[in-house]
Image: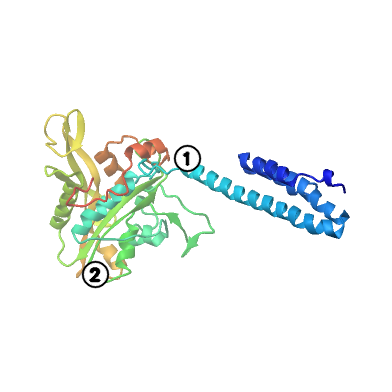
Amino acid sequence: MMDQQKPDLEQLKQDLSAAIDVATGLDTLDAVRVHALGKNGVVTNLLKTLGGMSPEERKVEGPRINGLRSEIAGAIEAKKDALAAEELAERMASETLDLSLPPKDTPKGSVHPVSQVMDELAEIFADLGFAVATGPEIEDDWHNFTALNIPESHPARAMHDTFYFGENQMRDGMPMMLRTHTSPVQIRTMTSGEPPFRIIAPGRTYRSDSDATHTPMFHQVEGLVIDRDITMGHLKWTLETFVKAFFERDDIVLRFRPSYFPFTEPSAEIDMGFSVENGRRIVGGDPNGPDGGWMELGGSGMVNRHVIAACNLDPDEWQGFAFGCGIDRLAMLKYGMDDLRAFFDGDLRWIEHYGFSALDVPTLSAGVGA
Ligand code: PHE
C-alpha cells in the first residue's frame, strides 16, 4: 500500500466523534455505531487491511487502527449512557405524581332497607335481652304446621298459600315446603335448648301471593319469650317499647284486637295508631284526631300450651308470648316507600336512593334509624 493512499485516521476520528456528539437519540447513535464498527463499517474495514500489510507496516498501523476502534467504541458507550440518563430525567420531569389530587370515588354499594331494618330490630331487642335466632327457609310439615298446632286438614293451612316441593323432597311422608312464616323458629328454639327463651327471628318467608303490598317472598320477624309467670302485660309492654324505639317516637298507641291463631291462645292482632303530619301519614300521634286511624302491625298472643307440649316442655311450668310482624311493611312505613315490589326488583337506582351506608350502624344512643 502506498503511503499517500493511507487513510487519514485523525480526520476519520474527528468525523465519527462529531457524528456521535450530535446524535440526539439512541437510534441515531446506533446508526453511527453500525457505520463505524458494523460488519462493513469504516473502522472494521480498516482493521481488515491489516492482514495485507508487511509486518513492519502492521506494527505501526495495528495500534493506530485498534486505538481508533476502541476510542470510537468508548465514545459510543459514553454517549449511550448520557442519552439514557437524559431520557430518564425527562420522564421524571414529565411523570410527576400529583399527590394533592383527590382519589377517584369507588362505588361502595349500600345496605338494603330490609337489611337495615333487621339490624335495627336486632339492636332494639338485644337491649331488651333478646337473642337473634334463625331457621331454614325450606321447612318440613312438622315445624311449619303440626308442632304449631295446625294439624293436617286444619283450615289454617289453606290460609297460608304454601309453596310445596314435589315428591322427591319429602320428610316423614310429607312434602317439604318454603316456610310460610317465621313461627317454625319458635319450635326450633324450644326443641334445641333449655328455657327460659327470649329470641327474635327475622328472615325470609314465602306465600303464593302477589300485588302492590304482597310479594311471593317477604320478610317477617318472630318474637318469642318463654319463662315462668309471663303475662300478656309483658307482651304489650315489649311491643310498645319496640315500636317506640323503632319509629323513634314516644306518642305511639297500640290497640289489641281479639283474633285467632292456632299457635297462640288468647290471640290478638296488634294495631298502631297513626295521624297525619304535613300531609304525610305517620305512625304515632292521635289515632282519634282528624285523618287519624289504626294500621295493622302484626299478630301475637300467649303461646298455646299444645305448642309448648309439642316441644317437650311442661306447659304448667313454662309459658310465654309470641308475636310476628312483616318487616317489609315496617321499612315502608318508616322510610316512606309505597310499592313493595320495588324492594325486590334489583333496580340500582332504587337501592341508591333508599339504601343505607354500610358505615351507619344502627345504635340506640345515636338513633336506630341513622
Ligand atoms: N305466624 C303468624 C303469621 O304469619 C303471625 C304470628 C306470629 C301470630 C306469632 C301470632 C304469634 O300470620
In the drawing, what numbered circle is on residue 232?
none
Confirm whether residue 181 shows in the render. Answer: no
Q: Nearer the viewer, mark 2 or mark 1?
A: 1
Is disc 1 surrounded by few (<14), some (14 to 19) or many (20+) residues within 10 Å? few
> Disc 2 residue type?
Pro
Is disc 2 surrounded by few (<14), some (14 to 19) or many (20+) residues within 10 Å? some
Q: Position of residue 264 (x, y in %)?
A: 25, 56
Q: Is residue 33 left or right of residue 152?
A: right
Circles 2 and 1 in contact, beta carbons < 8 Å: no
Q: Is residue 70 left or right of residue 298?
A: right
Quarter of the figure with residue 307 = bottom left
Q: Position of residue 78 (x, y in %)?
A: 60, 50
Q: CA distance from mark 2 to mark 1?
A: 73 Å
Write the residue at 68% across / 50% down. Answer: 72
Q: Earlier in the sequence, mark 2 or mark 1?
A: 1
Q: Position of residue 227 (x, y in %)?
A: 19, 66
Which residue carries the number 1 mark? Answer: 94
Q: Nearer the viewer, residue 4 or 296?
A: 4
Q: Is residue 93 left or right of residue 230?
A: right
Which residue carries the number 2 mark? Answer: 195
> Disc 1 residue type?
Ser
Q: Is mark 2 within 8 Å of ligand 1?
A: no
Write the residue at 37% across / 48% down. Answer: 160
